[in-house]
Image: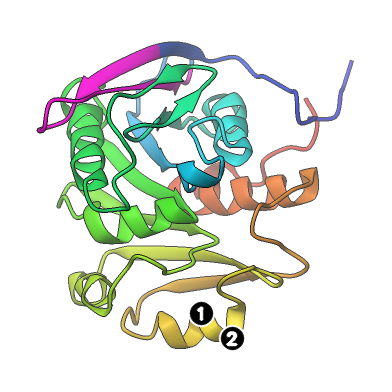
Amino acid sequence: MVELIRPSTVLPAERSAITFLTSDGLELIGEIARPIQDKQGVGLLCLHPLPTHGGMMDSHIYKKAANRLPELAGINVIRFNTRGTKSDQGSSQGQFGQGITEREDVVAAINYSFEQLGIKKLWVSGWSFGSDLALKYARDKKVMGLILLSPPLRFSTDDDLAFWGQDGRSVTALIPEFDDYLKPDQAKQRFAPIPQVELVSVKDGKHLWVGEPFVHRVLSEIVKVIAPERLPIPLEI
């Protein structure tokens, strides 16, 4: 029987808890959701919103990506809690570092994805605060590109943006029409140092992407970048 995909839908995947160490000795916890019998090694590393405002690896867009995209798009979805962040999965060691010491978290997660999880092609997605972490620290040459959700550009500097402009790798940014921090017109100006950026303005969207239509839109834009041959992703199963 055909059923609508709902917020609670969890599709088949091989799900495993992960832990890894940062260069400054902190243990971070997370999860990988793998496609069943994965052979492609395509991965999405998720950097969550601001932990001091409730952001964590289970923030709903990334939780739903892990619940759906391994089956619907063949993508390995890797989530973790940055230092000092708690979720139902557990707590990562350390304390919130104001977007500074989180550099070590991002670098460690990227290295772990390639070296221990066997990911062959990795994209990094950041949501809100996580988008700043991606722009600042996800510079490893093996990273294919960035997918930014509701980027506020609060911690990123002009030099961070200039790096990606000169680097040339793909950067896609989803900008909600009614975002709390950076609306579409402002985004055009702020992202000017990255000439190759694809700015996707989402009509009626808000910073937190609440509601199944917006979840489907965000996940579709992620799949468009990573596995466009798997579009459209279904609304029913």
| Residue at the image point whose x is 28% and y is 51% from the top | 144
Q: Main secondary structure of the magenta part?
A: strand
Side of 220 where 3 appears, left or right? right
Side of 189 where 61 appears, left or right? right
Residue 62 lies in the magenta stretch: no
The amino acid at mark 2 is: Asp
**Colouring rule applied to residues:** rainbow
Looking at this view, name the residue that lies furthest to the left.
Answer: 23
Q: Pointer 2: residues within 10 angstroms few (<14), some, or many (20+)?
A: few
Side of 214 where 127 appears, left or right? left
Query: Quadrant of the image for the C terminus?
Result: top right
Instruction: Where is residue 3? Give x, y as percent.
Output: 86, 23
| Measured Cα–Cα span from mark 2 to mark 1 | 5 Å
The residue beneath circle 1 is 187
| Residue at the image point whose x is 69% and y is 45% from the top | 215
Residue 29 lies in the magenta stretch: yes
Instruction: Where is residue 29? Give x, y as percent.
Output: 35, 21
| Residue at the image point whose x is 42% and y is 82% from the top | 190
The residue beneath circle 2 is 185
Residue sitting nearer the eye, 37 or 149? 149
Q: Identify the magenta region.
A: 17-35
> Is residue 137 shown above or below 11?
below
Instruction: Where is residue 187? Give x, y as percent.
Output: 51, 79
Q: Are marks 2 and 1 in contact (CB under 8 Å)?
A: yes
